[in-house]
Image (cartoon, rainbow, N blue to C red):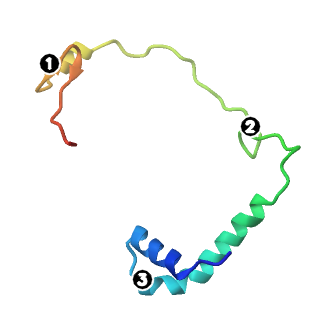
Amino acid sequence: MALTPDDLNSLARLTMLEPAALPALSASLDQAILLAAGIRQTDTANTTPLISPLDLTQRLRADHVSETDQRDRYQQLAPAVQDGLYLVPKVLD
């Protein structure tokens, strides 16, 4: 599957690259697409998924409280608090 000129123009717009730079990258992009297509064709029907390629168990630390609750103290420093929540200025419409 080769990239069409429309695909390249769309990629230029999405990646904010100059359209003139994409033809030089076209061959690399085509190779990446072929690699992904080859991976998709691999038969994985009888394969068990791995959590880690090394099949290691993760060491976990003990789950215990190490600090006391100081929420009220921290909220005294906040410019605006309501019902235990920090109030912040609206940034999105």
Q: Amino acid at mark 3?
A: Pro
Residue located 45% across and 78% down the image: 9
Tell me residue 80's x, y (percent): 12, 24
Q: Which mark is residue 56?
A: 2
* Mark 2 in CB contact with mark 3 (< 8 angstroms): no
Residue with the mark numbered 1 = 76
The one of 73 and 24 positioned closer to us in this rendering: 24
Q: Amino acid at mark 1?
A: Gln
Q: Estimate how packed mark 3 is, as few (under 14), some (14 to 19) or many (20 or more) residues with alpha carbons within 10 Å.
A: some
Closer to us: mark 1 or mark 3?
3
Q: CA distance from mark 2 to mark 3?
A: 46 Å
Q: 63 above or below 60?
A: above
Tell me residue 21's x, y (percent): 45, 84
Tell me residue 79's x, y (percent): 11, 27
Residue located 17% across and 17% down the image: 82
Tell me residue 66's x, y (percent): 43, 16
The one of 54 and 12 positioned closer to us in this rendering: 12
The one of 9 and 15 positioned closer to us in this rendering: 9
What residue occupies the far left of the structure in this picture? Answer: 79
Q: CA distance from mark 1 to mark 3?
A: 54 Å
Secondary structure beneath label 1: helix
Left or right: where 28 falls relative to 56: left
Closer to us: mark 2 or mark 3?
3
Residue with the mark numbered 3 = 19
Q: Estimate how packed mark 1 is, as few (under 14), some (14 to 19) or many (20 or more) residues with alpha carbons within 10 Å.
A: few
Left or right: where 38 falls relative to 58: right
Nearest to N terminus: mark 1 or mark 3: 3
